Image (cartoon, grey):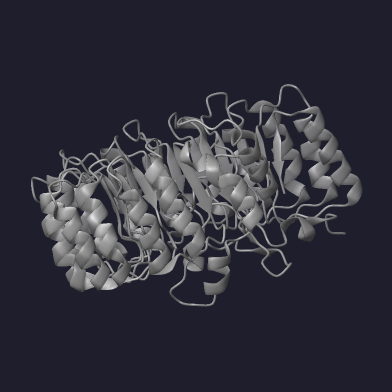
Amino acid sequence: MSRPGRVAAVAGSLCVPRPGLSSLLPQTRLPQTLMKNKDKTHSPWRRVRSQGPLWVGPLGQGVTFSSLGLSLQRLPAFSGEGSCQNWEEKVQLTSDTPSPTMSLEIQCEDLSSTRWTEILPSMQQYGVIRLDDCGLTDTMCANISSVLQANSSLTELSLPNNELKDEGAQLVLKGLQNPNCKIQKLSLQNCSITGAGCELILSLLRTKPTLRDLQLSDNHLGDEGMKLLCEGLMDPRCSLERLELEYCEVTTASCEALSSVLKAKGSLQELTLNNNELGEAGVVLLCQGLMDPNCKLQVLKLEGCGVTSANCKDLSMVLQTKESLQELCLGENKIGDAGLAQLYQGVLSPTCRLKTLWLWECDITAEGCKVLAQILMGKPCLKKLSLICNLLGDEGAELLCQALVDPNCQLEELWLRTCGFTTASCANFCTVLEKNRTLRELQLSTNMLEDDGIEQMSRGLMHPDCSIQSLWLGDCELSDKCCGTLAAILLANHTLKELDLSNNRMGDEGIRLLVASLKEPSCTLEQLVLFDIYWTEEVDNELTALKESKPSLRITS
């Protein structure tokens, strides 16, 4: 029997476990703008890539996208808990006595005229205003514009997932032109803005030296819009530090202007260009800008941009010359083992200070793991590595594990989802769990580890010096058979705080074994994720009772 109320609980909702030990995203419906575009090739829908199970139920059905990879950094960073109703309550609690240090946050609520009338007067006093997927109209945008001219305390305005179009965006931007406005962060993500709508953004960049963070992803800016943006970015008064332009229909034609920006704008620290068709020629131009001494970029995201193995030679040169660069994201580019070999020289350069390297879905094989092993052993500053959706196999796992036990390896997070591992890899992972003292997060979901694999890994997980805090084992073909071992691990391991067992073949018997350990005061687990696992109503009642008796434990299902 399926868990009572499961489909009803997720119908019309997006529920994604956040990586690490931070709280979960609130349960919230998928923004209507994404719903409308979900069948298009160019769509924010394609951006939703989770490190854990992703539930989407726009039509009243629960669907698990268990094969997707990567990062929640692409999703909005919500700070609250619970459902959309909880967010509405949060606003009601804070809107009575607003102050410049408080935030107005409303998400996934089609604001009625009555509700809007209630909120509008207090908007003049908030320091942060976030209205996400609220169905804002042109009239509301005009109201916001007037409010902005009277609010000298506003530092952040976020209006993502509203169909403002150029007309609504221009109304809002006119309000920000007020000389007293000290805006620092502006998000107009997925607002149906076109290249023509960038005229006022250009003006804002020229006139607002306080603006540090600009998010324009998922808009149809194109090369026309990029030309205008780059004009604004080149202005000496512009002090922008962070620019997000994911899914903006940018092509090679814009890369020369972007290269000029990189050369001239030393303030720019983070540039996101994911999922734009830059191509090999465009990346060459970007690298020319990156190698300029004036460029101080720290984060470069080029996922799904058509980066080739030939580009990796230029990127290697960037890594050798750009000490400021700390994060490089190249996921969903077919660089292969040949491209990785080119990057190797740059990563191991003494001047390279890279901390995060994302290489998911890059056609890397076990052969490439020889290079990766050298990087892990030779670059102690590297803390995060994603190899999701590369067919590394058990041979690749062995090479990586040999490097992970080297004292010079200081990696803290390793993402190995959907890498073709089997039970044969688990003995090697056990050795890592026993000997590695820095690894905090290990993602092994969607690998055929099976029950015997968990049995092999258990010695490492129960080792007194095991450092793992977050372990992802979703969709690993686990059954009730391994739950006794998992229950013993929960009692023996006091470092493990987060465990994901989603989309496995467990039932009442296995869940009860886990519950027995979770009840014990000696069990210190803080979060258990059980998406797409089914149990009876009786077991559901036991889980409910457990959550009530142990508030420090969050069970997500």
Quick check: 305 left or right of 268? Answer: right
Q: Give the mark count.
A: 0
Q: Is residue 402 something one can see in this rendering?
A: no
Quick check: 319 left or right of 450? Answer: left
Position of residue 424 relative to residue 212, above or below, is below
Quick check: 32 left or right of 199? Answer: right
Q: Residue 166's image quarter?
A: bottom left
Front one among 241 and 118: 118
Q: Residue at x 73, y 67 (%)?
A: 61
Position of residue 92 relative to residue 200, above or below, is above
Position of residue 324 relative to residue 318, above or below, is above
Q: Residue 360's image quarter?
A: bottom left
Front one among 161 and 292: 161
Residue 109 position, x and y percent, is 63, 55
Q: Residue at x 76, y 39 (%)?
A: 484
Q: Quadrant of the N terminus?
A: bottom right
Q: Residue at x 20, y 67 (%)?
A: 227
Front one among 233 and 176: 176
Q: Residue 261's image quarter?
A: bottom left
Q: Residue at x 15, y 44 (%)?
A: 266
Residue 181 position, x and y percent, is 32, 42
Residue 469 position, x and y percent, is 55, 33
Q: Is residue 485 something one can see in this rendering?
A: yes
Residue 153 position, x and y percent, is 39, 35
